[in-house]
Amino acid sequence: MTDSPHKNGTTRRGFLAGTAVAGAAAITGTVARADAPDPAITEVQPWARYLGEGVDARPYGTPSEHEAHVVRRNVEWLTADPISSVNFTPIHELDGIITPNGLCFERHHGGIAEIDPAQYRLMINGLVDRELIFTLEDLMRFPRENRAYFLECAANSGMEWRGAQLNGCQYTHGMIHNVMYTGVRLRTLLEEAGVQPEGEWLLAEGADASAMTRSIPMEKALDDCMVAFKMNGEALRPEQGYPVRLVVPGWEGNMWVKWLRRLEVGDQPWHHREETSKYTDLFADGRARRFTWEMDAKSIITSPSPQKPISHGPGPMVLTGLAWSGRGTIPRVDVTIDGGINWHEARMDGPSWDKSLHRFYYDFEWDGSPMIIQSRAHDSTGYVQPTKDELREVRGENSIYHNNGIQTYAVAADGSVENVEIA
């Protein structure tokens, strides 16, 4: 923490030390007088008067009851039925870069498939030397790897193409999560089957009721894709594809087929055959972009944000958010608090992994004035996150997918935050 000067001449460290001695009332932003002790620290609290539960009371740990509001949420009117809908990660309540398993957003096409792992099978067929069928135990006998990747739905921020719509980053940017996957390189399994020279495409098929299928170029399949059976150290959750899912780093989430049951090698994509319809990026003139798999560099301020307003008065403040790119890492994020008049380089903290979330912070002294805040990501290829208007100039407003435009929030003097757009 730096000793940046406070508006009244005190330093950040001095300000915090003073509030600690006096007993800060963090909710109101006021500071208790030194001659008026804070009973929350001077008196014995109820939780210190009795013994708590023992180590066997909670065999599978759960969050504190005081964190019960930190949950995935859906938007009821978004789709006709939640079986083929999505819920959203509460990114405004999280920190760091790893998403807890119970908070990873869900997107289903036929509801959650409940699969008995003892009956699970994965087939590789098509243009291969040996058609193979693996059990879960078979897969776990191959050499394993651990990789942290973000998974983002192509429709993340899709409601915002025509303007500010949903007031909360959970709803505008919450179709994303970032976990540590454990599994087998897809390349390893394909080499076991022996891909024939004409095998240039791979059809991945799920075992859910929708028989979800996607075509993947063999070049990508042999690069960094994984067949994963664990996330953040434990088995996949049913809603995340238990017992096995496909991991397609940096590419749109619909390619990450869950409940993976079959991999067919072919000489062309299956979009004209049995494969379910692909997501399409529509231009203003009616044309559509084809094969837009990679997720462009993007960022979002998670606090302050509409669901995470400022709960204190003027003084030291931490602005924080997430940035990511499907093409590499994020070496830099800029933030502005005056609507883009001045930009400041944020402080990156935590691991910087390929195709993974990155955490940024901007520590400053808030004087209590209204702010217009934005973040702008730079990825390792040199790409810079565009404004929404720059995107619309090229692509119009007909699309739902791949909106990576800069998000704008208006922060009022009372600390409340609203999703807005500026010219």
Image (tube, rainbow, N blue to C red):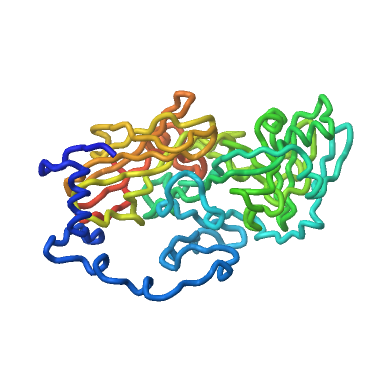
Q: Is residue 158 above or below residue 37?
A: above
Provide residue 211's location: percent of width, then percent of height.
Answer: 73, 52
- Front position in the image: 121 or 402: 121
Question: Would residue 52 be found to the left or right of residue 119 on screen?
Answer: left
Q: Is residue 289 above or below residue 56?
A: above
Question: Would residue 251 be found to the left or right of residue 16 on screen?
Answer: right
- Front position in the image: 182 or 335: 182
* Residue name at image x 11 percent, y 41 percent: 9
Q: Quadrant of the N terminus?
A: top left
Q: Is residue 174 above or below residue 285?
A: below
* Residue name at image x 68 percent, y 44 percent: 228
Provide residue 261's location: percent of width, then percent of height.
Answer: 77, 49
Q: Quadrant of residue 373?
A: top left
* Residue name at image x 39 percent, y 43 percent: 321
Provide residue 264's location: percent of width, then percent of height.
Answer: 79, 39
Q: Quadrant of residue 143?
A: top right
Q: Quadrant of the C terminus?
A: top left
